[in-house]
Amino acid sequence: MAKPSQTSPVVGGVDTHKDLHVAAVVDQNDQVLGTHSFATTRQGYKLMLAWMRSFGDVQRIGVECTGSYGAGLLRYMQAARVDVLEVTAPDKLDRRRRGKNDDFDAESAAHAAFAKRRTVTPRSRDGMVESLRVLKVCRKTAVQARRIALQIIQTTIVCAPDRLRDTLRKMTRMQLIRTLAAWRPDLTAYRDIEEAYRIAFKSLARRYLELHDEIADLDTMIQAIVTDLAPELIARNSIGLNSAAQLLLTAGDNPERLKSEASFAALCGVSPVPASSGKTTRHRLNRGGDRAANSALHIIAIGRLRLDPKTQEYVARRVAQGHSKLEAIRCLKRYIAREVFNIIARRHKQINQAQIAA
């Protein structure tokens, strides 16, 4: 096949992996022009883009897994002003017909980007929301490690010698942790059972306190970022720091990719799904979307239901109309999603205008 002219439009597709990315290019008739593998390095990304441009003018690129293996490629292509679409799912019919390998997956991504099906605009990963995501992941793992340390302390107390167990079992959590951290066991007597328990308790308590301080530091950083990004959000009733942070993560650094508040509601899994049949008209619970965002909206809804008189009146009115309390809470979550999206979109517009003015 003769190589097309340099001005002919082409579309790329990439199947991403840890060490190698497999790229494919299709022409303006959706015919495959070639496939090639590239290293997952900055030089590899440069060679990939040059290889795609050797076939013609690259209109857009479909990339799998832009949130993991494809994150570096996404940042490079966006910096190079290349339109990138995230391919959300493989073509199951094509996979059953042709089978699976990396070249087929790259070609499938290119076909999807060409037709603009099974694709979405990916979240950009070059702003403060990405910084927030990294800190949130670090905090989550620190909280898990702290909880495990406490659980080990509590289970070890059950098996400890009587003299140690009797002095520890009636203390509150922080009393217990600080008491254990202040112990001075004989580190040379680790062969003795009681001293071995003392050494283990002190080690676990120090680990707990270190993680406790680390979580406090991370909370300070997360609060500063959330305040910069959306101060109005955390000022609203029952929207706490963690819930606000999660909703900002779901919206991303480029919330303009969401066309409306309904798109954000669907992304959070709070948009009702039609389930009508025949003469029956009904909607069912949406079990899709970002479940972490859905959980954040649920926490906000429960908080308002406990503390906000207007919310209590709304739920009571819904129940009087024949809805269950859970159905009323689902309606409330949909309303909160609309409120949150408008706040985030308005703040994002203000930040962009300030950057342009600067």
Image: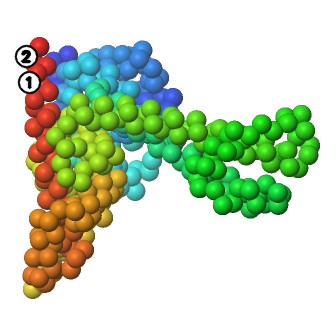
Q: Please tell me how crowded label 2 is: few (under 14), some (14-19), or many (20+) other residues with Cα within 10 Å.
A: few
Q: Nearer the viewer, residue 341 or 61?
A: 341
Q: Quadrant of the C terminus?
A: top left
Which residue does the image show at 38% across and 20% down from the upper left? 45
Q: To which quarter of the image does residue 127 belong?
A: top left
Is residue 16 left or right of 130 when viewed as pictured? right
Q: Please tell me how crowded label 1 is: few (under 14), some (14-19), or many (20+) other residues with Cα within 10 Å.
A: few
* Residue labelled with disc 2: 357
Q: Secondary structure at mark 1?
A: helix
Q: Secondary structure at mark 2?
A: helix
Which color scheme is applied?
rainbow
Measured as percent of width and height from the top left, residue 27 is found at: 22, 31
Is residue 80 left or right of 260 when viewed as pictured? right
* Residue labelled with disc 1: 353
Q: CA distance from mark 2 to mark 1?
A: 6 Å
Q: Amino acid at mark 1?
A: Gln
Say if residue 355 shows up in the picture.
yes
Measured as percent of width and height from the top left, residue 29 is found at: 18, 36
Q: To which quarter of the image does residue 41 belong?
A: top left
Q: Amino acid at mark 2?
A: Ala
Q: Are marks 2 and 1 in contact (CB under 8 Å)?
A: yes
Which residue does the image show at 29% across and 29% down from the upper left? 128
Which residue does the image show at 15% across and 33% down from the upper left? 348
Which residue does the image show at 47% across and 23% down from the upper left? 39
Q: Nearer the viewer, residue 178 or 28?
A: 178
Q: Nearer the viewer, residue 255 or 114?
A: 255
Say if residue 115 shows up in the picture.
no
Is residue 209 left or right of 113 when viewed as pictured? right
Measured as percent of width and height from the top left, residue 77 is found at: 29, 23
Q: Quadrant of the N terminus?
A: top left
